[in-house]
Amino acid sequence: MPVQFKDYYKILNVPREASNEDIKKAFRKLARQYHPDVAKDKKAAEEKFKEINEAYEVLGDPENRKKYDELGSNWRDGTDFQPPPGWQQGRAQGAPFSEGSFEFRFDGTGFSDFFEQFFGRSGRFDGFSDFGHRQEYSDGEAGFARRGSDLESDILVTLEEASKGSVRVLTLQRTNRKTGQARTQTIKVKIPPGVIDGQIIRVPGMGNEGIGGGAPGDLYLRIRFAAHPDFRVRGADLYYSLDLAPWEAVLGARIVISTLQDRVSVKIPPGANSGQQLRVRGRGLVNGQSGEKGDLFVVINIVVPEKVTEEERELWNRLSRVSHFNPRNS
Amino acid sequence: MKEPGNAKEESTQELQPVEHSMRAVYTIEAIADLAQVPRRLIILYCKHGLVVPASKSPDSGWYFDDRAIRAVRRIENLRNAYGMNLTGIKLMMHLMKEVERLREEVRFFHRQ
Protein backbone atom coordinates (compact mmCIF):
# COMPACT_ATOMS: atom_id res chain seq x y z
CA MET A 1 0.00 0.00 0.00
CA PRO A 2 1.67 3.26 -1.06
CA VAL A 3 1.82 6.02 1.50
CA GLN A 4 2.38 9.70 0.94
CA PHE A 5 5.79 11.06 1.69
CA LYS A 6 6.12 13.58 4.51
CA ASP A 7 8.75 16.27 4.23
CA TYR A 8 9.42 16.81 7.91
CA TYR A 9 12.09 19.45 7.30
CA LYS A 10 9.62 21.50 5.33
CA ILE A 11 6.97 21.03 8.02
CA LEU A 12 9.31 22.40 10.70
CA ASN A 13 10.65 24.97 8.25
CA VAL A 14 14.30 24.10 8.88
CA PRO A 15 17.12 23.26 6.44
CA ARG A 16 18.26 19.63 6.19
CA GLU A 17 21.53 20.48 7.92
CA ALA A 18 19.80 22.15 10.90
CA SER A 19 21.28 21.38 14.32
CA ASN A 20 19.31 19.60 17.04
CA GLU A 21 18.99 22.90 18.84
CA ASP A 22 17.55 24.59 15.72
CA ILE A 23 15.02 21.78 15.34
CA LYS A 24 13.97 22.09 18.97
CA LYS A 25 13.56 25.84 18.63
CA ALA A 26 11.60 25.54 15.39
CA PHE A 27 9.31 22.98 17.02
CA ARG A 28 8.69 25.16 20.08
CA LYS A 29 7.92 28.19 17.99
CA LEU A 30 5.46 26.37 15.72
CA ALA A 31 3.94 24.34 18.54
CA ARG A 32 3.15 27.52 20.46
CA GLN A 33 1.61 29.07 17.37
CA TYR A 34 -0.53 26.09 16.44
CA HIS A 35 -1.29 24.62 19.84
CA PRO A 36 -4.99 23.67 19.68
CA ASP A 37 -5.64 25.40 23.00
CA VAL A 38 -4.43 28.80 21.90
CA ALA A 39 -5.06 28.97 18.15
CA LYS A 40 -8.13 30.77 16.79
CA ASP A 41 -9.01 28.34 14.01
CA LYS A 42 -8.98 25.23 16.18
CA LYS A 43 -9.65 22.63 13.50
CA ALA A 44 -6.95 23.78 11.09
CA ALA A 45 -4.51 24.37 13.95
CA GLU A 46 -5.07 20.87 15.29
CA GLU A 47 -4.13 19.28 11.97
CA LYS A 48 -1.05 21.46 11.72
CA PHE A 49 -0.12 20.75 15.34
CA LYS A 50 -0.25 16.99 14.76
CA GLU A 51 1.95 17.36 11.70
CA ILE A 52 4.49 19.44 13.63
CA ASN A 53 4.49 16.91 16.44
CA GLU A 54 5.06 14.03 14.08
CA ALA A 55 7.92 15.89 12.38
CA TYR A 56 9.48 16.52 15.78
CA GLU A 57 9.08 12.87 16.82
CA VAL A 58 11.24 11.96 13.84
CA LEU A 59 13.71 14.85 13.49
CA GLY A 60 14.02 15.46 17.23
CA ASP A 61 15.36 11.95 17.78
CA PRO A 62 18.84 11.46 16.27
CA GLU A 63 18.20 7.79 15.52
CA ASN A 64 14.91 8.45 13.75
CA ARG A 65 16.38 11.42 11.95
CA LYS A 66 19.22 9.32 10.59
CA LYS A 67 16.76 6.71 9.41
CA TYR A 68 14.65 9.39 7.77
CA ASP A 69 17.65 11.02 6.07
CA GLU A 70 18.55 7.68 4.51
CA LEU A 71 15.43 7.99 2.37
CA GLY A 72 17.16 10.71 0.41
CA SER A 73 16.24 14.30 -0.30
CA ASN A 74 14.53 13.86 -3.64
CA TRP A 75 11.09 13.08 -2.28
CA ARG A 76 8.47 15.75 -2.37
CA ASP A 77 5.85 16.24 0.31
CA GLY A 78 2.57 14.50 -0.47
CA THR A 79 3.79 12.28 -3.34
CA ASP A 80 3.32 8.51 -3.31
CA PHE A 81 6.27 6.96 -1.64
CA GLN A 82 7.98 3.60 -1.94
CA PRO A 83 11.05 3.00 0.20
CA PRO A 84 14.37 2.13 -1.47
CA PRO A 85 14.97 -1.63 -1.76
CA GLY A 86 16.26 -3.23 1.40
CA TRP A 87 15.23 -0.25 3.50
CA GLN A 88 14.14 -1.46 6.88
CA GLN A 89 10.57 -0.64 7.65
CA GLY A 90 8.97 -0.22 11.00
CA ARG A 91 6.39 -2.86 10.42
CA ALA A 92 7.20 -6.31 9.27
CA GLN A 93 6.60 -6.95 5.59
CA GLY A 94 5.34 -3.61 4.46
CA ALA A 95 1.73 -2.86 4.92
CA PRO A 96 0.62 -1.25 8.16
CA PHE A 97 -1.25 -3.56 10.48
CA SER A 98 -0.85 -6.63 8.36
CA GLU A 99 -2.85 -9.26 10.13
CA GLY A 100 -3.37 -12.43 8.22
CA SER A 101 -5.70 -11.77 5.36
CA PHE A 102 -6.69 -8.22 6.29
CA GLU A 103 -4.93 -4.93 5.96
CA PHE A 104 -5.73 -2.12 8.38
CA ARG A 105 -5.63 1.62 8.13
CA PHE A 106 -6.38 3.97 10.98
CA ASP A 107 -7.41 7.56 10.73
CA GLY A 108 -7.83 9.99 13.57
CA THR A 109 -5.02 8.68 15.76
CA GLY A 110 -2.94 11.79 15.09
CA PHE A 111 -0.25 9.97 13.10
CA SER A 112 0.06 9.79 9.32
CA ASP A 113 0.32 6.49 7.41
CA PHE A 114 3.88 7.43 6.51
CA PHE A 115 4.81 7.78 10.17
CA GLU A 116 2.97 4.61 11.16
CA GLN A 117 4.74 2.62 8.53
CA PHE A 118 8.29 3.74 9.20
CA PHE A 119 8.42 5.14 12.70
CA GLY A 120 5.34 3.62 14.29
CA ARG A 121 4.88 1.22 17.14
CA SER A 122 5.98 -2.05 15.70
CA GLY A 123 9.21 -0.42 14.69
CA ARG A 124 9.58 0.19 18.38
CA PHE A 125 9.69 -3.50 19.16
CA ASP A 126 6.42 -3.55 21.01
CA GLY A 127 2.86 -3.99 19.96
CA PHE A 128 1.93 -7.26 18.56
CA SER A 129 0.38 -6.35 15.26
CA ASP A 130 3.52 -7.52 13.58
CA PHE A 131 3.82 -10.58 15.72
CA GLY A 132 0.35 -11.44 14.64
CA HIS A 133 0.68 -13.31 11.40
CA ARG A 134 -1.79 -15.81 12.62
CA GLN A 135 -2.32 -19.08 10.95
CA GLU A 136 -5.16 -19.12 8.47
CA TYR A 137 -7.88 -21.59 9.25
CA SER A 138 -9.62 -23.24 6.36
CA ASP A 139 -13.36 -23.83 6.24
CA GLY A 140 -12.66 -27.52 6.73
CA GLU A 141 -12.19 -26.86 10.40
CA ALA A 142 -15.84 -26.12 10.94
CA GLY A 143 -17.00 -26.15 14.52
CA PHE A 144 -13.74 -24.80 15.82
CA ALA A 145 -14.40 -21.32 17.09
CA ARG A 146 -11.46 -19.03 17.53
CA ARG A 147 -11.37 -15.52 18.91
CA GLY A 148 -10.18 -12.86 16.47
CA SER A 149 -6.75 -11.36 17.06
CA ASP A 150 -6.25 -7.96 18.62
CA LEU A 151 -5.16 -4.72 17.04
CA GLU A 152 -2.99 -2.10 18.61
CA SER A 153 -2.39 1.51 17.68
CA ASP A 154 -0.90 4.64 19.19
CA ILE A 155 -3.13 7.64 19.71
CA LEU A 156 -1.66 11.12 19.99
CA VAL A 157 -3.04 13.05 22.95
CA THR A 158 -2.12 16.56 24.09
CA LEU A 159 -1.38 17.22 27.76
CA GLU A 160 -4.50 19.39 27.97
CA GLU A 161 -6.64 16.56 26.55
CA ALA A 162 -5.07 14.18 29.04
CA SER A 163 -5.94 16.37 31.99
CA LYS A 164 -9.44 17.34 30.87
CA GLY A 165 -10.39 14.27 28.85
CA SER A 166 -11.82 14.33 25.32
CA VAL A 167 -13.77 12.39 22.73
CA ARG A 168 -11.93 11.22 19.63
CA VAL A 169 -13.36 9.94 16.39
CA LEU A 170 -11.36 7.18 14.74
CA THR A 171 -11.94 5.44 11.47
CA LEU A 172 -10.66 1.99 10.84
CA GLN A 173 -10.54 0.65 7.32
CA ARG A 174 -10.15 -3.09 6.83
CA THR A 175 -9.28 -4.37 3.41
CA ASN A 176 -9.58 -8.04 2.61
CA ARG A 177 -6.38 -8.97 0.83
CA LYS A 178 -7.99 -11.69 -1.26
CA THR A 179 -11.12 -9.91 -2.42
CA GLY A 180 -9.90 -6.32 -2.13
CA GLN A 181 -13.15 -5.49 -0.37
CA ALA A 182 -12.87 -2.60 2.05
CA ARG A 183 -15.00 -1.93 5.09
CA THR A 184 -14.81 1.30 7.05
CA GLN A 185 -15.88 1.61 10.63
CA THR A 186 -16.06 4.81 12.59
CA ILE A 187 -15.80 4.80 16.35
CA LYS A 188 -15.93 7.44 18.99
CA VAL A 189 -13.61 6.87 21.88
CA LYS A 190 -13.72 8.75 25.16
CA ILE A 191 -10.29 9.61 26.45
CA PRO A 192 -10.90 9.75 30.20
CA PRO A 193 -9.34 12.62 32.16
CA GLY A 194 -6.19 11.53 33.95
CA VAL A 195 -4.75 9.23 31.28
CA ILE A 196 -0.97 8.95 31.30
CA ASP A 197 1.57 8.28 28.59
CA GLY A 198 1.72 4.63 27.66
CA GLN A 199 -1.65 3.82 29.14
CA ILE A 200 -3.82 1.38 27.25
CA ILE A 201 -7.45 2.00 26.34
CA ARG A 202 -9.27 -1.17 25.44
CA VAL A 203 -12.00 -0.90 22.83
CA PRO A 204 -13.84 -4.22 23.04
CA GLY A 205 -14.75 -6.07 19.86
CA MET A 206 -12.98 -3.74 17.42
CA GLY A 207 -10.13 -6.11 16.61
CA ASN A 208 -10.02 -8.82 13.98
CA GLU A 209 -13.12 -10.87 13.28
CA GLY A 210 -13.35 -14.24 14.96
CA ILE A 211 -13.11 -17.51 13.07
CA GLY A 212 -15.83 -20.15 13.04
CA GLY A 213 -18.18 -18.03 15.13
CA GLY A 214 -15.49 -16.92 17.59
CA ALA A 215 -15.74 -13.52 19.22
CA PRO A 216 -13.92 -10.59 17.59
CA GLY A 217 -10.65 -9.39 19.10
CA ASP A 218 -10.17 -6.07 20.86
CA LEU A 219 -8.55 -2.84 19.79
CA TYR A 220 -5.92 -1.46 22.16
CA LEU A 221 -5.16 2.23 21.90
CA ARG A 222 -1.93 3.25 23.49
CA ILE A 223 -1.84 6.84 24.74
CA ARG A 224 1.09 8.77 23.42
CA PHE A 225 1.58 12.32 24.64
CA ALA A 226 2.22 15.00 22.07
CA ALA A 227 5.41 16.94 22.71
CA HIS A 228 4.54 20.16 24.51
CA PRO A 229 6.41 23.40 23.73
CA ASP A 230 7.03 24.11 27.42
CA PHE A 231 6.80 20.89 29.39
CA ARG A 232 8.44 17.51 29.34
CA VAL A 233 6.69 14.61 31.02
CA ARG A 234 7.97 11.86 33.25
CA GLY A 235 5.26 9.73 34.78
CA ALA A 236 2.85 12.25 36.31
CA ASP A 237 5.54 14.92 36.77
CA LEU A 238 6.14 17.84 34.43
CA TYR A 239 9.51 19.44 33.79
CA TYR A 240 9.86 23.06 32.79
CA SER A 241 13.17 24.48 31.68
CA LEU A 242 13.58 28.00 33.04
CA ASP A 243 16.15 30.22 31.36
CA LEU A 244 17.91 32.61 33.73
CA ALA A 245 20.39 35.42 33.22
CA PRO A 246 23.64 34.86 35.19
CA TRP A 247 22.84 37.70 37.61
CA GLU A 248 19.33 36.33 38.24
CA ALA A 249 20.91 33.01 39.16
CA VAL A 250 23.43 34.66 41.47
CA LEU A 251 21.13 37.17 43.14
CA GLY A 252 17.92 35.15 43.13
CA ALA A 253 14.68 36.17 41.43
CA ARG A 254 10.95 35.78 41.45
CA ILE A 255 9.51 34.55 38.16
CA VAL A 256 5.94 33.85 37.07
CA ILE A 257 5.43 30.58 35.22
CA SER A 258 2.29 29.39 33.42
CA THR A 259 1.45 25.84 34.47
CA LEU A 260 -1.22 23.70 32.80
CA GLN A 261 -3.78 24.93 35.35
CA ASP A 262 -2.75 28.43 36.38
CA ARG A 263 0.16 30.79 36.85
CA VAL A 264 2.53 30.42 39.76
CA SER A 265 5.21 32.70 41.06
CA VAL A 266 8.44 30.81 41.65
CA LYS A 267 11.12 32.09 43.98
CA ILE A 268 14.59 31.36 42.66
CA PRO A 269 17.02 31.19 45.61
CA PRO A 270 20.27 33.16 45.31
CA GLY A 271 23.10 31.02 43.93
CA ALA A 272 20.92 28.77 41.77
CA ASN A 273 22.91 26.55 39.44
CA SER A 274 22.21 25.19 35.97
CA GLY A 275 20.42 21.86 36.19
CA GLN A 276 19.11 22.55 39.69
CA GLN A 277 15.47 21.55 40.11
CA LEU A 278 12.83 23.42 42.06
CA ARG A 279 9.65 21.55 42.87
CA VAL A 280 6.21 23.15 42.60
CA ARG A 281 3.94 20.69 44.35
CA GLY A 282 0.74 19.45 42.76
CA ARG A 283 1.11 21.30 39.44
CA GLY A 284 1.85 18.16 37.40
CA LEU A 285 -0.59 15.71 35.85
CA VAL A 286 -3.06 13.57 37.74
CA ASN A 287 -2.70 9.83 37.23
CA GLY A 288 -6.30 8.68 36.90
CA GLN A 289 -5.37 5.08 37.66
CA SER A 290 -3.49 5.58 40.91
CA GLY A 291 -4.91 8.97 41.86
CA GLU A 292 -1.34 10.19 42.30
CA LYS A 293 -0.85 13.91 41.71
CA GLY A 294 2.36 14.86 39.97
CA ASP A 295 4.58 17.86 40.60
CA LEU A 296 6.05 20.51 38.35
CA PHE A 297 9.84 20.64 38.35
CA VAL A 298 11.43 23.88 37.30
CA VAL A 299 14.87 23.11 35.89
CA ILE A 300 17.31 26.03 35.99
CA ASN A 301 19.14 26.81 32.77
CA ILE A 302 21.59 29.68 32.91
CA VAL A 303 21.88 31.52 29.60
CA VAL A 304 24.84 33.73 28.85
CA PRO A 305 24.35 36.79 26.60
CA GLU A 306 25.93 36.32 23.19
CA LYS A 307 26.64 39.99 22.66
CA VAL A 308 27.56 42.56 25.28
CA THR A 309 27.91 46.33 25.11
CA GLU A 310 31.14 48.11 25.99
CA GLU A 311 29.73 49.07 29.35
CA GLU A 312 28.66 45.48 30.13
CA ARG A 313 32.06 44.17 29.10
CA GLU A 314 33.68 46.64 31.48
CA LEU A 315 31.42 45.43 34.31
CA TRP A 316 32.20 41.76 33.60
CA ASN A 317 35.88 42.63 33.50
CA ARG A 318 35.62 44.34 36.83
CA LEU A 319 33.78 41.36 38.25
CA SER A 320 36.47 38.98 37.01
CA ARG A 321 39.14 41.05 38.76
CA VAL A 322 37.24 41.36 42.02
CA SER A 323 35.79 37.83 42.29
CA HIS A 324 37.62 34.95 43.97
CA PHE A 325 35.22 32.43 42.50
CA ASN A 326 36.81 29.56 40.59
CA PRO A 327 34.33 26.96 39.30
CA ARG A 328 37.14 24.43 38.64
CA ASN A 329 38.47 24.59 42.15
CA SER A 330 36.24 22.39 44.22
CA MET B 1 -22.41 12.22 13.09
CA LYS B 2 -23.55 12.93 9.55
CA GLU B 3 -20.96 14.49 7.38
CA PRO B 4 -22.24 15.75 4.05
CA GLY B 5 -20.13 14.78 1.09
CA ASN B 6 -18.51 12.01 3.03
CA ALA B 7 -21.49 9.69 3.27
CA LYS B 8 -20.49 6.16 4.02
CA GLU B 9 -22.99 3.46 4.77
CA GLU B 10 -21.54 2.81 8.19
CA SER B 11 -21.61 6.41 9.30
CA THR B 12 -25.35 6.92 9.01
CA GLN B 13 -26.03 5.70 12.51
CA GLU B 14 -25.46 7.83 15.56
CA LEU B 15 -22.19 6.86 17.15
CA GLN B 16 -22.05 6.02 20.81
CA PRO B 17 -18.75 6.91 22.38
CA VAL B 18 -16.83 3.98 23.78
CA GLU B 19 -16.46 4.65 27.48
CA HIS B 20 -13.36 3.53 29.20
CA SER B 21 -13.20 3.31 32.92
CA MET B 22 -9.66 3.37 34.18
CA ARG B 23 -10.56 1.76 37.44
CA ALA B 24 -12.77 -1.02 36.08
CA VAL B 25 -11.87 -4.35 37.61
CA TYR B 26 -12.87 -7.86 36.61
CA THR B 27 -13.06 -11.15 38.40
CA ILE B 28 -10.95 -14.01 37.13
CA GLU B 29 -14.05 -15.54 35.51
CA ALA B 30 -14.78 -12.27 33.70
CA ILE B 31 -11.30 -11.93 32.26
CA ALA B 32 -11.25 -15.61 31.33
CA ASP B 33 -14.38 -14.88 29.34
CA LEU B 34 -13.18 -11.58 27.85
CA ALA B 35 -9.79 -12.92 26.82
CA GLN B 36 -11.22 -16.35 25.98
CA VAL B 37 -8.56 -18.13 27.94
CA PRO B 38 -9.30 -20.88 30.48
CA ARG B 39 -9.25 -19.85 34.13
CA ARG B 40 -6.54 -22.36 35.05
CA LEU B 41 -4.17 -20.79 32.50
CA ILE B 42 -4.71 -17.34 33.98
CA ILE B 43 -3.86 -18.75 37.41
CA LEU B 44 -0.73 -20.29 35.90
CA TYR B 45 0.28 -16.96 34.32
CA CYS B 46 -0.24 -15.25 37.67
CA LYS B 47 1.94 -17.84 39.41
CA HIS B 48 4.70 -17.13 36.92
CA GLY B 49 4.31 -13.40 37.46
CA LEU B 50 3.30 -12.79 33.84
CA VAL B 51 -0.05 -11.36 34.84
CA VAL B 52 -0.43 -9.34 38.00
CA PRO B 53 -3.86 -9.00 39.63
CA ALA B 54 -4.89 -5.41 40.39
CA SER B 55 -5.90 -6.54 43.85
CA LYS B 56 -5.27 -9.73 45.67
CA SER B 57 -6.62 -10.33 49.14
CA PRO B 58 -7.64 -13.52 50.92
CA ASP B 59 -11.22 -12.36 51.55
CA SER B 60 -12.13 -10.51 48.35
CA GLY B 61 -10.23 -12.71 45.90
CA TRP B 62 -8.35 -11.71 42.77
CA TYR B 63 -9.38 -8.77 40.64
CA PHE B 64 -7.89 -7.75 37.31
CA ASP B 65 -7.89 -4.60 35.18
CA ASP B 66 -7.62 -3.92 31.43
CA ARG B 67 -3.85 -4.23 31.57
CA ALA B 68 -4.26 -7.83 32.70
CA ILE B 69 -6.57 -8.61 29.77
CA ARG B 70 -3.99 -7.21 27.38
CA ALA B 71 -1.23 -9.18 29.08
CA VAL B 72 -3.22 -12.42 28.82
CA ARG B 73 -3.99 -11.80 25.16
CA ARG B 74 -0.39 -11.03 24.46
CA ILE B 75 0.86 -14.20 26.15
CA GLU B 76 -1.63 -16.23 24.13
CA ASN B 77 -0.36 -14.60 20.99
CA LEU B 78 3.28 -15.37 21.77
CA ARG B 79 2.39 -18.96 22.57
CA ASN B 80 0.23 -19.56 19.52
CA ALA B 81 2.09 -17.65 16.86
CA TYR B 82 5.63 -18.36 18.01
CA GLY B 83 5.35 -21.48 20.11
CA MET B 84 7.12 -19.77 22.99
CA ASN B 85 7.18 -21.35 26.43
CA LEU B 86 6.46 -19.48 29.64
CA THR B 87 10.12 -18.85 30.47
CA GLY B 88 10.66 -17.39 27.01
CA ILE B 89 7.54 -15.27 27.27
CA LYS B 90 8.62 -14.00 30.67
CA LEU B 91 11.98 -12.93 29.29
CA MET B 92 10.40 -11.41 26.19
CA MET B 93 7.87 -9.39 28.17
CA HIS B 94 10.54 -8.23 30.56
CA LEU B 95 12.75 -7.08 27.69
CA MET B 96 9.91 -5.34 25.88
CA LYS B 97 9.05 -3.45 29.04
CA GLU B 98 12.69 -2.53 29.57
CA VAL B 99 13.15 -1.32 25.99
CA GLU B 100 10.01 0.75 26.30
CA ARG B 101 11.22 2.31 29.55
CA LEU B 102 14.64 3.11 28.10
CA ARG B 103 13.10 4.63 24.98
CA GLU B 104 11.00 6.89 27.17
CA GLU B 105 14.13 7.96 29.04
CA VAL B 106 15.95 8.70 25.79
CA ARG B 107 12.99 10.73 24.53
CA PHE B 108 12.91 12.67 27.79
CA PHE B 109 16.59 13.58 27.61
CA HIS B 110 16.58 14.36 23.90
CA ARG B 111 13.96 16.96 24.53
CA GLN B 112 15.97 18.72 27.19
Image (tube, rainbow, N blue to C red):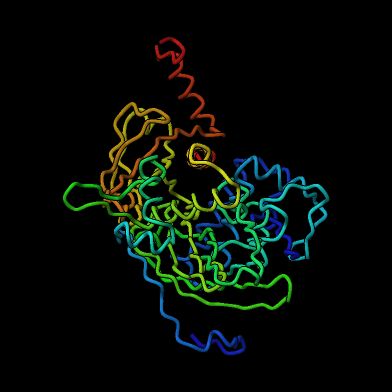
**Left or right: B104 in relation to A247:** right
Relative height, residue B84 to residue A320 (above, below)? below
x%, y% of residue A82? 79, 58
x%, y% of residue A191? 40, 65
Residue shown at the point (32%, 54%) measured from the top left: B64
**Left or right: A85 in relation to A68:** right
Q: Quadrant of the N terminus of chain A?
A: bottom right
x%, y% of residue A67? 71, 44
Residue shown at the point (60%, 47%) measured from the top left: B82
Figure quadrant of residue A105:
bottom right
Residue sitting at the far left: B59
Relative height, residue B75 to residue A101 (above, below)? above
The answer to whether one can see residue A134 in this image is: yes
Q: Nearer the viewer, residue A181 or A96?
A: A181
Residue shown at the point (32%, 52%) measured from the top left: A287
Relative height, residue A95 to residue A62 (above, below)? below
Q: Nearer the viewer, residue A54 or A308?
A: A54
The answer to whether one can see residue A49 in this image is: no
Tally the marks: 0
Residue sitting at the far top: A329
